């Protein structure tokens, strides 16, 4: 096959994959800036051409439309009479829920990755009796479906007074992510030659100093990659956040879903909330992209 034809086929395949991945995101973004009266129109609106005025009449059946930020305004602020044109009375619950998701995700990621790093180093460097079985037991906690333990956890949290609290979700997400971070980070520490630690011990370092000054800097890429996965897991978690909240959703995922009900589905606010919800995790993943790429080839370290 000629080289030119191979290149065309490769770029064509990449283009198809990009379209498949980005089309849903583009659709969500477009829906979030579509006027509510046009979202359910027979002809989907795909291309915004200008910023719509509040009194602008409805356009004809066309893919072009005037963009509006009414959905974001209704999602973030409380309006008098629950109308877009009503006077803004204050912030809604959604900014607080986004803040709760961010705080819970960051704290649970720090705790799970921090504890998992120390546990993984112990599994990788020390001879632990039945260490393989113990490591499998740690990982097996992730095999249990969340719905199977949600009722016992609900009863336990109710007895401890942790229902509807950020502390409860931080502890829960830390426990669930700890097994994953331990198992994943052990593979990274296994790829670091043991001779580095032995050399540090011969130079007079304590085991803690060897861990902090030698092993930990070399495992930074693995730690960053693990942190991304743990943060995404905590950020997207829905079932426990929904059931362990009391009156109103504590985090953003249940809040976005709560806009579907018997009275109708507000697709504009759902799309706006989804766009806002995607921004922090996208920025965090983008900031860690170099560590993610290096983490894939971390095993290239040779003895």
Image (cartoon, rainbow, N blue to C red):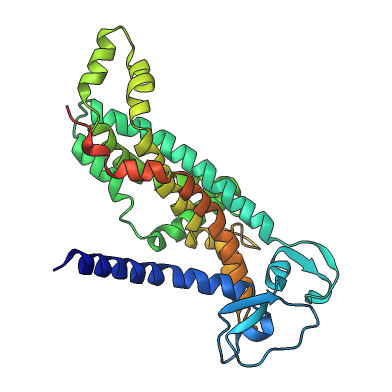
Q: Please tell me which residue is depicted at 33% across the width and 39% down the height of the picture.
A: 182
Which residue is at the far left?
1
- Location of the N terminus (image quadrant): bottom left
Which residue is at the far right?
87
- Res 124 quadrant in image: top left
Residue 94 left/right relative to 177: right
* Picture mark count: 0
Question: 178 and 184: which one is in front?
Answer: 184
Question: 49 and 197: which one is in front?
Answer: 49
Q: Please tell me which residue is depicted at 67% across the width and 81% down the height of the picture.
A: 36
Residue 121 position, x and y percent, is 30, 29
Residue 252 left/right relative to 85: left
Residue 283 position, x and y percent, is 52, 50
Q: Is residue 262 visible?
A: no
- Location of the C terminus (image quadrant): top left
Residue 94 position, x and y percent, is 67, 61
Q: Is residue 24 visible?
A: yes
- 11 to 121, vertically: above or below: below
- 85 to 154, vertically: above or below: below
Residue 44 position, x and y percent, is 55, 86
Q: Please tell me which residue is depicted at 62% across the width and 55% down the height of the picture.
A: 98
Residue 7 left/right relative to 62: left
- Res 207 quadrant in image: top left
- 94 to 71, vertically: above or below: above
- 194 to 205, vertically: above or below: below
Question: 103 and 11: which one is in front?
Answer: 11
Q: Please tell me which residue is depicted at 30% across the width and 66% down the height of the picture.
A: 11
């Amino acid at each position: 096959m000629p080289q030119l034809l191979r290149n065309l086929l490769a770029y064509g395949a990449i283009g198809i994959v990009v379209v498949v991945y980005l089309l849903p995101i583009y659709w969500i973004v477009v829906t979030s800036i579509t006027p509510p009266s046009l979202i359910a129109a027979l002809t989907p609106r795909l291309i915004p051409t200008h910023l719509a005025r509040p009194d602008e009449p409805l356009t004809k059946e066309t893919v072009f439309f005037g963009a509006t930020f009414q959905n974001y305004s209704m999602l973030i602020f409380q309006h008098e009479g629950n109308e877009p044109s009503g006077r803004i009375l204050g912030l809604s619950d959604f900014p607080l829920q986004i803040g709760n998701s961010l705080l819970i995700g960051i704290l649970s990621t720090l705790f799970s990755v921090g504890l998992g790093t120390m546990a993984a180093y112990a599994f990788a460097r020390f001879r632990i009796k039945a260490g393989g079985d113990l490591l499998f037991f740690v990982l097996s906690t992730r095999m249990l479906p969340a719905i199977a333990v949600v009722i016992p956890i609900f009863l336990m949290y109710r007895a401890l007074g942790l229902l509807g609290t950020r502390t409860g979700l931080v502890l829960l997400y830390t426990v669930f992510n700890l097994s994953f971070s331990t198992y994943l980070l052990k593979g990274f520490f296994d790829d670091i030659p043991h001779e580095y630690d032995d050399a540090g011990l011969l130079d007079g370092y304590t085991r803690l100093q060897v861990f902090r000054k030698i092993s930990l800097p070399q495992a930074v890429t693995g730690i960053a990659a693990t942190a991304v996965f743990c943060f995404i897991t905590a950020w997207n978690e829905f079932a426990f956040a929904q059931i362990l909240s009391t009156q109103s959703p504590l985090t953003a995922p249940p809040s976005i879903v709560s806009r579907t009900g018997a009275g109708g589905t507000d697709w504009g606010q759902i799309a706006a909330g989804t766009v806002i919800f995607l921004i922090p995790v996208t920025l965090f993943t983008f900031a860690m992209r170099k560590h993610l790429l290096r983490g894939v080839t971390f095993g290239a370290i040779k003895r």
